[in-house]
Amino acid sequence: MPLHHDGSMTDHRHRWTAVSAHQVSEGLVVYQRCACGQWRITSTSPYPEVELIIPG
Ligand SMILES: [Zn+2]
């Protein structure tokens, strides 16, 4: 007889909430948490590509 696992919390769409952010040399590291207890870490570059405009 197969066992049926309760997957009520395993297959839902995570809703990420930013908990904290830390500036590191590579950019900004953001810690996000879902209501189910799952964590994820994302990072963004602090230096967006800026076009240098030199008048004259
Ligand atoms: Zn979740």
Image: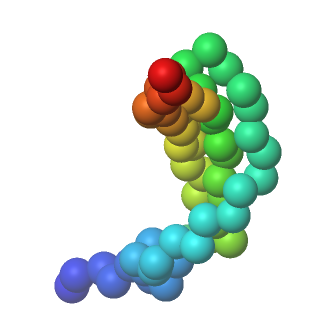
36 shown above or below 42: below
Tell me what residue is drawn at x 67 percent, y 20 percent: 24
Instruction: Pick out the residue farthest to the right.
Output: 20
Residue toward you, 51 or 34 = 51
39 shown above or below 10: above
Tell me what residue is drawn at x 68 percent, y 71 percent: 35
Numbered marks: total: 0
* Left or right side of 48 for 22: right
* Left or right side of 35 for 9: left
Ligand 1, seen in the image, is in the quarter at bottom right
Q: Give x and y (percent) for residue 26.
A: 55, 19
Tell me what residue is drawn at x 46 percent, y 79 percent: 12
- How was the colour assigned to the protein in this rendering? rainbow
Q: Give x and y (percent) for residue 30.
A: 65, 43
Is residue 37 visible to the viewer in this orientation of the structure? no
Residue toward you, 50 or 12 = 50
Is residue 24 visible to the viewer in this orientation of the structure? yes
Q: Quadrant of residue 33?
A: bottom right
Q: Give x and y (percent) for residue 22.
A: 74, 31
Instruction: Pick out the residue farthest to the top.
Output: 25
Tell me what residue is drawn at x 72 percent, y 26 percent: 23
